[in-house]
């Protein structure tokens, strides 16, 4: 069977699972509990930036990724469900205090 050659989509050069498997252990652990479906490439880019800012502290880098994810969720919640949605409000007022 011939492939559809009339597509404008880029072909993947590597397997997404292989890219995921090559991620640092601490990042893979964080991704296992992430609310959003991060690509390996995007997650690694943010992880490296957060790890540099945290001077190598993996827990602080994971916390940074969680804040980034919460901001993304709040932005999408405001667009989709309006500014009064609880997820949109939590970004405007800051993170919730620990229980």
Image (tube, rainbow, N blue to C red):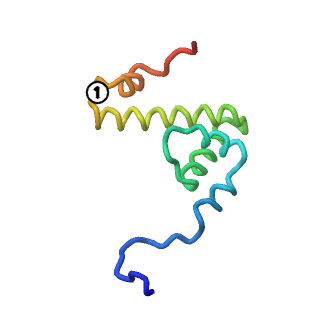
Q: Quadrant of residue 9?
A: bottom left
At x 39%, y 27%, the residue is 87
Furthest-left residue in this view: 82
- Most extreme residue toward the bottom, as rendered? 2
Left or right: where does residue 42 sit relative to residue 28? left
Q: Residue 29 is drawn in which quadrant?
A: top right
* Above or below for 6 versus 13: below
Tally of numbered tags: 1
Considering only vertical position in the picture, is 3 above or below 41? below
In the foreground, 68 or 80: 80
Identified at 43% across, 87% down, the residue is 2
Which residue is at 48% across, 73% downward? 11
Residue labelled with disc 1: 83
Task: Determine whether, in the image, residue 26 is placed left or right of residue 4.
Answer: right
Q: Quadrant of residue 33?
A: top right
Depth check, front residue: 49 or 19: 19
Q: Where's the C terminus, which quadrant?
A: top right
Packing grade of label 1 (10 A; few <14, some 14-19, many >=20) is some
Tell me residue 62's x, y (percent): 63, 35
Pinpoint residue 38: horizontal percent, then vertical percent: 52, 48
Q: Quadrant of the N terminus?
A: bottom left
* Direction from residue 79 to residue 27 in the image, left or right: right
Secondary element type, mark 1: loop
On the rendered structure, is 46 left or right of 5? right
User: What x and y, as percent, mark residue 92?
Assistant: 38, 23
Q: Position of residue 90 (x, y in %)?
A: 41, 22
């Amino acid at each position: 069977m011939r492939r559809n050659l009339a597509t404008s989509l880029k072909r993947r050069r590597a397997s997404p699972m292989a890219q995921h498997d090559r991620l640092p252990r601490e990042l893979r652990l964080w991704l296992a509990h992430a609310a959003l479906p991060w690509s390996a490439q995007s997650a690694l880019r943010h992880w490296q930036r957060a790890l540099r800012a945290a001077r190598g502290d993996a827990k602080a880098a994971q916390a940074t990724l969680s804040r980034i994810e919460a901001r993304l969720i709040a932005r999408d919640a405001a667009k989709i469900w309006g500014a009064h949605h609880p997820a949109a409000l939590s970004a405007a007022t800051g993170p919730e205090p620990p229980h």
